[in-house]
Image (cartoon, rainbow, N blue to C red):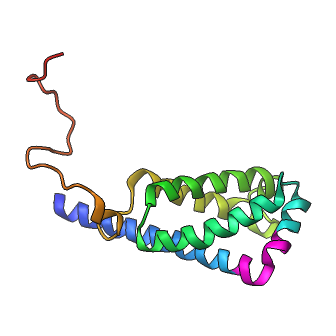
Amino acid sequence: MKAFVRVLQDLVLLVARLVLGGVSLLHGWYRWQTVGVEGQTQQFATAGVPAPEVFAWGVTMVELIGGALLVFGLLTPLLGLVFAAQAVLSVAWVTGPNGPWVADGGFEYVAVMGALALVLAGFGAGRASIDALFRRPPAEDESDELRYDDTRQG
């Protein structure tokens, strides 16, 4: 049963990475090719975002480069934190004042993407990732369970 749960966890993390990374990559490509950084800067300036040019470049590059890295599972916990921070800033500066509904330019989509990013920040990429290649396998005497070790001297 433990093996089944571990495989299921890896599959869920893979799907989460592919969805967040893929959607972010597509959004970044749209910002880069269709809206343009100048257009994104103008949108941010209109919304009252401080330093709109910096954030326009930052959001575009995070979505393009970070999205691609997430798809392959490289630097996943760090990128999860970056994407979660981006979601919080987006709700605070852009979509939050519009309320929760996307039809009104609301924040529920951003909130879901931010929550997904937090899952990846907390649980990592799973075994089907480049991150897994650089992880040290646990020693044979280590277990996942917390236990009291009375052999340790205080």
- Magenta extent: 30-40
Residue 83 drawn at (x, y percent): 58, 58
Q: Is residue 79 visible?
A: yes
Residue 80 drawn at (x, y percent): 51, 57
Q: Quadrant of the C terminus?
A: top left
Residue 37 drawn at (x, y percent): 79, 73
Q: Quadrant of residue 16?
A: bottom left
Point 76% across, 65% down: residue: 56
Farthest top residue in view: 154
In the displayed structure, does residue 146 sit left or right of residue 108? left
Point 52% across, 74% down: residue: 68
Q: Is residue 9 visible?
A: no
Q: Nearer the viewer, residue 21 or 130?
A: 130
Q: Quadrant of the N terminus?
A: bottom left
Point 39% across, 70% down: residue: 14
Magenta residues: mostly which secondary structure? helix
